[in-house]
Amino acid sequence: MSRSQKKTPIAAITAAASDKPFKVAEHRRERRAVKAGIANGQEPEHPKAYGNPWHGDKDGKAYMDQPQPRDLRK
């Protein structure tokens, strides 16, 4: 049986154990902005404007320059 391998040489790089602190902080930021917007009579921003997962603590990917065969194993 053949061994499956990754086609794209990407490695994960992160020091965060969890995304929870990031999500809590972004949700708090969204609630405060909505509250301030209601007080000022403005429309709140779209909910997707907060908590972008690509800017989270656990997002960390890097392309490998010269991957070894062991790096491409799944």
Image (cartoon, rainbow, N blue to C red):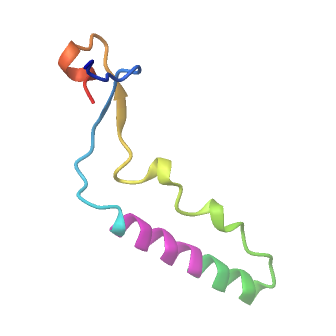
* Quadrant of image for the C terminus: top left
User: Residue 44's quadrant in the figure?
Assistant: bottom right
Q: Which residue occupies 22% across, 14% down?
A: 69
| Residue 58 coordinates in the image, percent (x, y) | 34, 51
Task: Please state which of residues 35 and 73 is positioned toward the viewer in this rendering.
Answer: 73
| Residue 39 coordinates in the image, percent (x, y) | 72, 89
> Would you say residue 66 sits in the magenta stretch?
no
Q: Which residue occupies 71% across, 66% down?
A: 46
Considering the whole magenta stretch, tell me its main secondary structure: helix
Give left or right: position of 17 versus 58: left
Q: Point out the stretch of residues depicted in magenta.
A: 21-31
- Position of residue 27 relative to residue 53, above or below, is below
Residue closest to the far bottom: 39
User: Residue 71's quadrant in the figure?
Assistant: top left
User: Residue 1's quadrant in the figure?
Assistant: top left
Residue closest to the far top: 66
Task: Please state which of residues 32 and 54 is positioned toward the viewer in this rendering.
Answer: 54
Give left or right: position of 38 versus 72: right
Residue closest to the far front: 1
Give left or right: position of 72 versus 33: left
Q: Which residue occupies 35% across, 53% down?
A: 57
- Position of residue 4 relative to residue 55, above or below, is above
Q: Which residue occupies 27% across, 10% down?
A: 66
- Position of residue 1 relative to residue 56, above or below, is above
**Label tally:** 0
Give left or right: position of 34 versus 59: right
| Residue 6 coordinates in the image, percent (x, y) | 35, 23
